């Protein structure tokens, strides 16, 4: 009988809003039994340190370097995950012994696939020892070593979700974190995926710089503004959008200078439109028109962004909840799923998702003992 893992996925994304946890029972293939989920917000001080770490990481040449605030940020990420897991298990009355694996993404502070360089903060070995649970971590590096982009990693889980819902027609999953990525899923076909542009990062940075707020809550600023078409055209002139997949992005790949002279509201509306246009640009490379777009990730909770995508999309747009899924938890579930696949030696990435030369497994296993 195939081994079934009770895995806990832990995700802290480039939006730097906090840690998502999700429990999943899975065989790393088609079996998906959803368990409880939880989110733990970073404090303002935590976010400030992580932003400093992202700034310091721009000068890295090796993925094991931790100069300046990077070492402190790595310690913080590890500690916050330990606290989150302990709270989650206590609240759900689950013993650590009942969890087979933790899938630990870590905090991305740099992603430069053209240099074969990706850096995720988080001490997987220390996490495993202190949590008392085996941890699978560092899941991107093996893909880069084999010629891939190291991102996106979630498509194999999107494909499992698509198969489980029995939709029977091409679907486009859109994950909106700090960066937006898409996965094209069609019955009987291998998934195709890539990053498509900014997700929440530019809008979050705008709100922090102009209003001292971590995000545009409920899309209020964007909904009060108007899209500046000249600024939007300048943003979309970036050569990224002319590149064919495979391709992946660093959080800070785009310069928001075109919206610098706009009011807060108009800048927010324009950046929402920019994210939406990047997502819809996926139409240029998918092999068949999607019949449904499914939104997940933090951006799926921003009404202004959902409206902007819906206005440009060639097919119906739905949130993951319309299919009985939790849009906030999908990435955390994905890393539970990836941990199970890694433990079984199954591929995490594929030529059509990252450009890796052949399907590749990945991740490092840190034993609790």
Image (cartoon, rainbow, N blue to C red):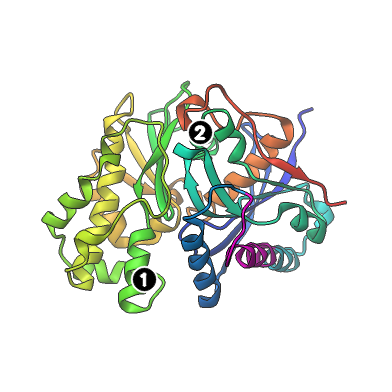
Q: Is residue 80 magenta?
A: yes
As drawn, the residue found furthest toward the right would be 369
For residue 183, say whether it is visible: no
Residue 265 picture location, percent across and down: 21, 70
Say which residue label 1 marks. 217
Q: How many marks?
A: 2
| SS for callout 1 | helix
Percent x, y for residue 173? 41, 41
**Residue 3 seen by the camera:** yes
Residue receiving disc 2: 159
- The quadrant holding residue 281 is top left
**Mark 1 vs mark 2, CA separation in Å:** 30 Å
Circle 2: element type: helix
- Whether 338 is among the magenta residues is no
Residue ID at (79%, 27%): 1
Where residue 157 sits in the image (x, y, percent)? 55, 38
Q: Is residue 50 left or right of residue 217?
A: right
Range drawn in magenta: 64-81
Q: Position of residue 175 (x, y in %)?
A: 43, 47
Q: 118 or 203, which lies in front?
A: 118
State which tag comes first along the sequence, 1 or 2.
2
Most extreme residue toward the left, as rendered? 230
Q: Is residue 356 above or below residue 235?
A: above
Query: Is the C-beta separation of discs 1 and 2 under 8 Å?
Result: no
- 192 sits to left or right of 49: left
The answer to which image quadrant residue 237 occupies is top left
- Residue depicted at 49% across the width and 25% down the height: 351
Q: Residues within 10 Å of mark 1 (few under 14, many from 20)?
A: some
């Amino acid at each position: 009988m195939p081994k079934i893992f009770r895995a806990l996925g832990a995700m802290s994304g480039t939006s730097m809003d906090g840690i998502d946890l999700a429990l999943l029972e899975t065989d790393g293939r088609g079996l998906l039994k959803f368990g409880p989920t939880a989110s733990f917000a970073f404090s303002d001080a935590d976010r400030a340190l992580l932003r400093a770490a992202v700034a310091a990481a721009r000068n890295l040449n090796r993925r094991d370097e931790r100069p300046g605030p990077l070492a402190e940020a790595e310690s913080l990420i590890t500690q916050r995950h330990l606290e989150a897991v302990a709270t989650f298990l206590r609240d759900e009355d689950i013993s650590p012994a009942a969890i087979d694996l933790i899938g630990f993404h870590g905090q991305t502070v740099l992603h430069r696939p053209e240099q074969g360089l990706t850096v995720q903060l988080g001490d997987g070995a220390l996490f495993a020892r202190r949590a008392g649970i085996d941890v699978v971590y560092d899941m991107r590096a093996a893909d880069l070593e084999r010629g891939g982009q190291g991102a996106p990693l979630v498509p194999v889980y999107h494909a499992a979700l698509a198969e489980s819902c029995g939709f029977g027609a091409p679907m486009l999953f859109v994950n909106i974190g700090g960066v937006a990525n898409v996965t094209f899923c069609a019955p009987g076909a291998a998934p195709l995926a890539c990053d498509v542009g900014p997700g929440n990062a530019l809008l979050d940075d705008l709100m922090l710089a102009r209003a001292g707020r971590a995000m545009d809550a409920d899309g209020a600023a964007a909904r009060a503004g108007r899209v500046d078409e000249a600024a939007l055209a300048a943003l979309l002139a970036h050569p990224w959008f002319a590149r064919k997949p495979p391709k992946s992005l660093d959080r800070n790949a785009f310069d928001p200078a075109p919206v610098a002279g706009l009011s807060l509201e108009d800048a927010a509306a324009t950046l929402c439109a920019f994210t939406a246009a990047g997502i819809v640009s996926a139409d240029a490379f998918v092999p068949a028109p999607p019949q449904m777009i499914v939104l997940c990730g933090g951006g799926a909770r921003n009404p202004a962004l959902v409206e902007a995508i819906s206005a440009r999309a060639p097919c119906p747009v739905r949130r993951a909840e319309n299919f009985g899924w939790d849009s906030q938890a999908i990435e955390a579930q994905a890393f539970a799923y990836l941990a199970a696949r890694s433990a079984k030696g199954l591929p995490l990435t594929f030529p059509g998702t990252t450009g890796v030369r052949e399907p590749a497994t990945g991740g490092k296993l840190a034993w609790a003992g």
